[in-house]
Every structure is written in structure tokens, then in C-alpha cells.
Image: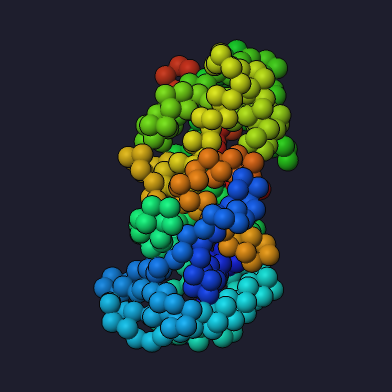
């Protein structure tokens, strides 16, 4: 069985091995440092490989090892020491790997030991790993789904650009002839140059979102969420800032919605980032519930695995704000940054994509 994956995909298998080897999931603070006295003992890790194939890795004890169960039937037992050795081997190979998909010789034997066939969850799932943990404070033992982010490869996107992430701005004061000239600008900084030419000769005012589903999802978070993002998006495309925390700082200074005190924009935008991270997708109607109902597991560049549990949501939101940025997608692919007429009015779309720093 030849297996190939990028660093992010291999990191999902690494997380499985690493957590099985330790049997504990430690919490992280806003700066992604381990909180020494906050951790969750792991009772078992669950995988649904294919329809009708239910895998469980039950951590019995350090002495008695880990039971690998396939459809509730024990197929073998592995030790935590073995898992630690496999995790260390895989970490080194991931670090050595290239930017694109690559194979790791020997990984097939590791996966055979674990009775699994896939290195990662489907890209459509927000939940990358499911585990049952023990809450030391309450005694509660929930089964939680976590999303995984790895620092071992290139920074992943938090929100992917698509036609659904277009924000529509009404443009005034621009003639059809000038609009044609603006659309013909094809410099390396064409989006910035087009916007500067529009604002030098006319005005841009946020109108609406291209996708009603995404608009409704944002409304669940906050009635003015799309207005906040639309203003931030224009700041970004005007080249005033890229990082989310810096964009929020400008928002606080300019206060376009007239909020009575500082901190409100940051509070609301952190809710948006957290919602995207844990379950909300732009083109899928969202009910406000977290798909990754446990939180976020992060693989640090030194191989340490930490988590932001939903119990510690404030720290996770703070981490997201400090570690994300706006990014440009493809203008041709996603249909933005070009002036067009609709119902005798002129518009331009600006596209939203958010990536980890």
C-alpha cells in the first residue's frame, strides 16, 4: 500500500500516534504555550475509516498498553512506547518532506499496526480526530471532535476563497468608459491599482453579499457581522493592513459603526474566526453549532501537540485573532475586482480569504 500526503495530512497521522503515546491532551494559552496544570486524559481515539469500519484505540494503561478494536473486536494491542517511537520517526520524516505530496517509507507498516488505511480525514470534514476524554473537574467523559492544524508545513487557510465569499460594493461616480479603463489595469498590484483609481474618481459603498447562505450564517453570529468584515476587507484591499489584529486595530480607531467603546469589533470578529474554525462553511447553511465540538488540536513546529478545548474558548479566540491574516484569492477563478453593471448600478466584488500566519 503506497501512501502519499502533504505535511498537513501526514500531521493527522502524527497526532494520532503522539496522543496515543502520551494518553493526555494538554491545553494551550493564547500564545500557544502549554498550560501545565490543564490537561485531559484520553480514554480512547475513534476513527471511521470507511462505511462499516469503526476503529477504536482504547488506552487501557501504560502497563497494559492500547487496545486496537475494529468494530468493537480487539485485533491487537500496542504499547505507548511503540507509539512514541513511531511518532518520533514520522515527525522526522514530515520535517524532511517537500512542499507537495510525498511518501514516507515504512508508514504502511505503522498503519498496519493501527489497522487503519487513511492518513487523514476527508477535506470536507471540520473534524479531523475524534476522541473520548476525561474531564478531571467534572468527571464528565464526552466524545469530542477536534480539527487539526499543523505548523510543520505551510500555513493552512482558515477560510478558503470561493464565489460564496464575495462581498459586493456599489460604485458611484465612475463612467462606463472609465470603468472599462479600470478593468483593463493588469499590473502586478492590479487590485490595489483598480481600487485606488475608483476612489480617486468616485466612491465605494458596501452593498450586500453575493451568497445569501453565507450572509445568513454571518447573521447568526451578529447582525452587523457582514458590515464589519466588508469594512475590514476594503481596508485590506486598500493596502492598509493584512493581519487580522492590525485590521481590527484600525477598525477600533475609525469606528465606522459608531460603537460606544473599544473592544467591540475585536469581540465580534473573534466570534467569526472561531465559528469558521469549528464548523461554519460559507456555502452551507449553518445552525450555529460547532462541527468540531471539542476544539482545535495544533501541532507545533517542535512536534508538541496542544489543544484549544471549547472549555477554553477565550484563549482559542485570542490565538485566532493574533495568528490569522487576510489573503487574495484568484481574481479570475472567484470573479472579483472587476467593475460591472447590474440593474443600472455599478458594482465591484471583493473576495474574502483568511489564512493562518
Q: Position of residue 253 (x, y in %)?
A: 67, 20
Q: Is residue 15 visible?
A: yes
Front one among 40 and 56: 40
Quarter of the image holding residue 43? bottom left
The residue shown at (28%, 77%) is 71
- Residue sitting farthest toward the right: 188
Q: Position of residue 21 (x, y in %)?
A: 53, 75
The residue shown at (41%, 85%) is 77
Q: Position of residue 232 (x, y in %)?
A: 60, 28
The image shows residue 167, relative to residue 155, as above or below, that is above
Q: Is residue 65 left or right of residue 55?
A: right
Q: Position of residue 60 (x, y in %)?
A: 40, 77
The residue shown at (42%, 19%) is 343
Front one among 344 and 60: 60
The image shows residue 244, relative to residue 157, as above or below, that is above
Identify the image's colour scheme: rainbow, by chain, secondary structure or one colour. rainbow
Q: Is residue 137 left or right of residue 186?
A: left
The image shows residue 196, relative to residue 321, as above or below, that is above
Quarter of the image holding residue 98? bottom right
Front one among 44 and 127: 44
Q: Is residue 139 left or right of residue 2?
A: left
Q: Is residue 191 visible?
A: no
Front one among 103 and 52: 52
The residue shown at (46%, 23%) is 224
Amino acid at each position: 500500500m503506497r501512501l502519499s500526503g502533504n505535511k498537513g495530512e501526514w500531521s493527522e497521522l502524527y497526532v494520532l500516534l503522539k496522543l496515543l503515546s502520551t494518553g493526555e491532551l494538554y491545553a494551550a494559552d493564547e500564545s500557544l504555550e502549554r498550560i501545565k496544570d490543564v490537561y485531559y486524559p484520553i480514554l480512547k481515539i475513534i476513527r471511521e475509516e470507511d462505511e462499516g469500519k469503526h476503529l477504536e484505540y482504547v488506552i487501557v494503561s501504560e502497563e497494559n498498553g492500547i487496545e486496537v478494536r475494529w468494530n468493537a473486536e480487539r485485533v491487537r494491542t500496542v504499547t505507548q512506547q511503540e507509539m512514541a517511537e513511531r511518532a518520533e520517526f514520522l515527525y522526522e520524516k514530515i520535517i524532511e518532506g517537500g512542499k507537495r505530496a510525498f511518501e514516507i517509507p515504512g508508514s504502511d507498516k505503522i498503519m498496519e499496526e493501527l489497522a487503519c488505511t487513511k492518513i487523514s480525514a476527508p477535506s470536507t470534514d471540520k473534524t479531523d480526530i475524534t476522541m473520548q476524554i476525561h474531564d478531571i473537574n467534572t468527571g464528565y467523559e464526552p466524545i469530542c471532535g477536534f480539527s487539526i492544524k499543523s505548523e510543520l508545513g505551510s500555513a493552512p487557510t482558515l477560510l478558503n476563497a470561493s464565489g460564496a465569499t464575495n462581498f459586493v460594493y456599489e460604485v458611484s461616480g465612475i463612467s462606463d468608459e472609465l470603468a472599462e479603463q479600470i478593468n483593463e489595469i493588469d499590473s502586478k498590484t492590479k487590485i490595489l491599482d483598480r481600487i485606488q483609481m475608483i476612489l480617486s474618481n468616485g466612491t465605494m459603498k458596501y452593498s450586500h453579499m453575493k451568497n445569501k447562505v453565507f450572509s445568513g450564517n454571518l447573521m447568526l453570529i451578529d447582525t452587523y457581522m457582514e458590515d464589519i468584515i466588508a469594512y475590514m476587507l476594503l481596508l485590506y484591499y486598500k493596502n492598509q493592513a493584512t493581519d487580522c489584529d492590525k485590521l481590527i486595530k484600525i477598525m477600533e480607531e475609525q469606528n465606522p459603526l459608531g460603537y460606544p467603546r473599544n473592544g467591540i469589533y475585536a469581540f465580534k470578529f473573534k466570534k467569526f474566526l472561531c465559528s469558521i474554525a469549528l464548523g461554519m462553511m460559507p456555502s452551507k447553511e449553518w445552525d450555529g453549532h460547532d462541527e468540531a465540538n471539542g476544539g482545535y488540536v495544533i501541532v507545533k513546529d517542535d512536534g508538541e501537540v496542544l489543544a484549544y478545548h471549547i472549555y477554553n474558548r477565550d484563549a482559542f479566540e485570542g490565538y485566532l485573532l493574533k495568528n490569522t491574516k487576510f489573503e487574495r484569492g484568484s481574481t479570475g477563478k472567484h470573479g472579483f475586482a472587476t467593475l460591472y453593471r447590474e440593474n443600472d448600478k455599478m458594482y465591484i466584488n471583493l473576495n474574502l480569504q483568511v489564512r493562518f500566519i
